[in-house]
Image (cartoon, helix red, strand yellow):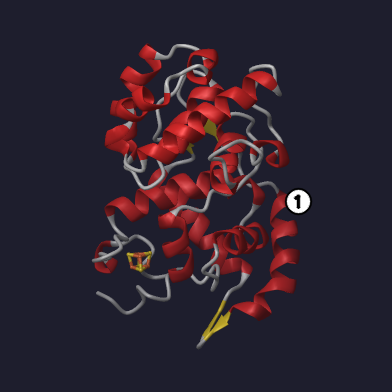
Amino acid sequence: MKCLLHISVVNQSVILGMMNRLRTHKEEFLVGEFSLDEAYVARVMELLDREYGTDFRCYLNYETPWQLLIATILSAQCTDARVNLVTKELFAKYPTLEAFAGAELTELEQDIKSTGFYHNKAKNIIACAKRLVDVYHGEVPSKIEDLTTLAGVGRKTANVIRGNIFREASIVVDTHVKRISKKLRFTKEEDPEKIEYDLMKVLPEDHWILYNIQIITLGRTICKARNPKCRECFLKEECPEGRGKT
Ligand code: SF4
């Protein structure tokens, strides 16, 4: 199973909710001459949808919820392509959650070594699998309060699970979302949790999951960290950092 998600068209109540949130929120977002308003946010959402569509696949491959959880733990400081290479063999070698719970630490470390930070990741994966088996009867929980009690699972990983497995509106703040959301003036914060709360106020709820995938794609192809290609960017007429670049 891949995490194919269908995002519905923005409905009227969502737009009204967004406008109300922005009315109370935009005062905090005056940056120089730039003020964040609902029309600007709606145009950015429209351009993202037009460029990348509203159907998408999660970049990590998985067959079961717990496999996505382990893949997401492995993805910290590692590319999704590398994680997918590793998990292809890993999930064949450890076909059940119980197999991960009973894995030998040093052996698992070697199995995942190429993803980096493998000592911590292996330790967390075993502890996470044990807790899922012992406390949650082998099921991945849906609540963020439960997910974040699992070893190696912070808000980012919890939101990946909530969005992709449970279709709960949730915002994943990764390096691309953090960087580009600041360029778009959706936030001024550095802390991922504060950025998540800012985005929850600014973005229409039915774009919360989609935004992450779209921004990752934008960050990998156009708005790169070292050399953003503003002149080629479909957002250049809207984005405060792209305006005037021809
Ligand atoms: S216009 Fe430039 S800074 Fe803005 S999103 Fe596009 S590439 Fe990034």
Residue 209: where, in percent of width, then height?
Answer: 56, 44
Q: Nearer the viewer, residue 135 or 218?
A: 135
Residue 142, above or below 237: above
Q: Is residue 105 in view from this perspective?
A: yes
The residue positioned 64% from the left and 17% from the top of the image is 138
Amino acid type, mark 1: Ser
Q: Is residue 4 in view from this perspective?
A: no
For the C terminus, give its image quadrant.
bottom left
The residue positioned 34% from the left and 33% from the top of the image is 83
Q: Quadrant for residue 230, please give it.
A: bottom left
Residue 30: where, in percent of width, then height?
Answer: 58, 82
Residue 148, above or below 129: below
Tell whether 21 sits left or right of 231.
Answer: right
Residue occupying the far bottom of the picture: 32
Q: Quadrant for residue 153, please give it.
A: top right
Q: Nearer the viewer, residue 3 or 36?
A: 3
Q: Quadrant for residue 149, please give it.
A: top right
Helix, strand or loop under label 1: helix
Q: Nearer the viewer, residue 31 or 152?
A: 152
Task: Determine which residue is flagged by label 1.
Answer: 13
Tell whether 70 sits left or right of 77.
Answer: right
Residue 224, above or below 211: below
Find ligand 1 in the image and state its quadrant: bottom left
Q: Is mark 1 within 8 Å of ligand 1?
A: no
Residue 140: where, in percent of width, then height?
Answer: 63, 25
The residue positioned 30% from the left and 63% from the top of the image is 225
Residue 214: where, in percent of width, then height?
Answer: 43, 48
Q: How many marks?
A: 1
Label 1 crowd (10 A; few <14 / some 14-19 / many >=20): few
